[in-house]
Amino acid sequence: MVALSGELFDAIEVNAARTGNHKRAAVRMSRLAVQATAGSMSRAEAHARAGEQWLLADDPTAAVEQFQKAIADGGPTFDEPRVPLARAMFALDRSEDAEALLRELRESDARSKARTCDLVAELLTEQGDLEAALDWATAGVDACLAGEDRDELQLLLRLRYRLRVVLGHARGRLRQAAGQQEGRSRRG
């Protein structure tokens, strides 16, 4: 019996990216998530990654099923599965369900996690809700400044800057604060 592992799923994803056959990868990952023994990867993470492949295979219905299984499992996941579930719901024109998930995220501790803020901001940008996207990007920058995530900080600052330019906002306090924080970390 095969054990769930990041290495196995990485290999499946790389092959899908190389061949463009995301449906085959999604089917394999979905089966492994159910049939394989627990290993270094949780079943929740396996379902979440299968859902991502279903999205790439342009099958949001199958993606919804996998993301719901990831959430129901409750195990650890690299990314918050409610974000891609909302993306799949939007793809199925289930906007009310997607917006309910985003409200649920807002009311949870998700805004303290920079990566989740980045993913939600990107999703909202895709949906054309630029003010809400800016709000999530700002929350992500705040989360980065409270922690030590410099890589995510740079991504969020770039996204936040682009959103502010499109919305016609002036340079913000966070950009200046991030520059000061960066200067302190170089001196320390």
Image (cartoon, grey):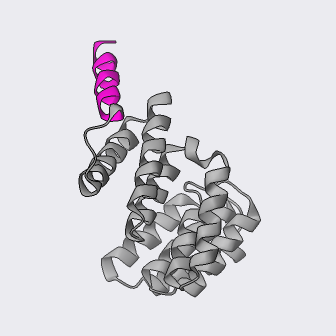
Residue at figure coordinates x 34%, y 27% from the top left: 177
Residue 172 vertical position relative to residue 64 in the rendered view, above or below = above
Residue 90 vertical position relative to residue 144 in the rendered view, above or below = below
Which quadrant does the N terminus fall into? bottom right
Looking at this view, is 185 or 18 the one in front?
185
Task: Answer whether residue 181 is magenta in the image.
Answer: yes
Residue 57: % across, % down: 44, 84
Which quadrant would residue 43 be assigned to in this image?
Answer: bottom right
Residue 111 vertical position relative to residue 4 in the rendered view, above or below = above
Looking at this view, is 22 or 10 the one in front?
22
Residue at figure coordinates x 31%, y 76% from the top left: 18
Task: Answer whether residue 147 is magenta in the image.
Answer: no
- Looking at the rendering, the stretch of residues picked out in magenta corresponds to 174-188
Dominant secondary structure (helix, strand or loop) of the stretch shown in magenta: helix
Looking at this view, is 59 or 116 the one in front?
116
Residue 185: % across, % down: 34, 19
| Count of labels in the image | 0
Q: Is residue 59 left or right of residue 72?
A: left
Residue at figure coordinates x 56%, y 70% from the top left: 86
Residue 180 vertical position relative to residue 17 in the rendered view, above or below = above
- Residue 4 visible to the viewer: no
Residue 39: % across, % down: 67, 58
- Residue 161 visible to the viewer: yes
Residue 176: % across, % down: 29, 29
Q: Is residue 151 left or right of residue 36?
A: left
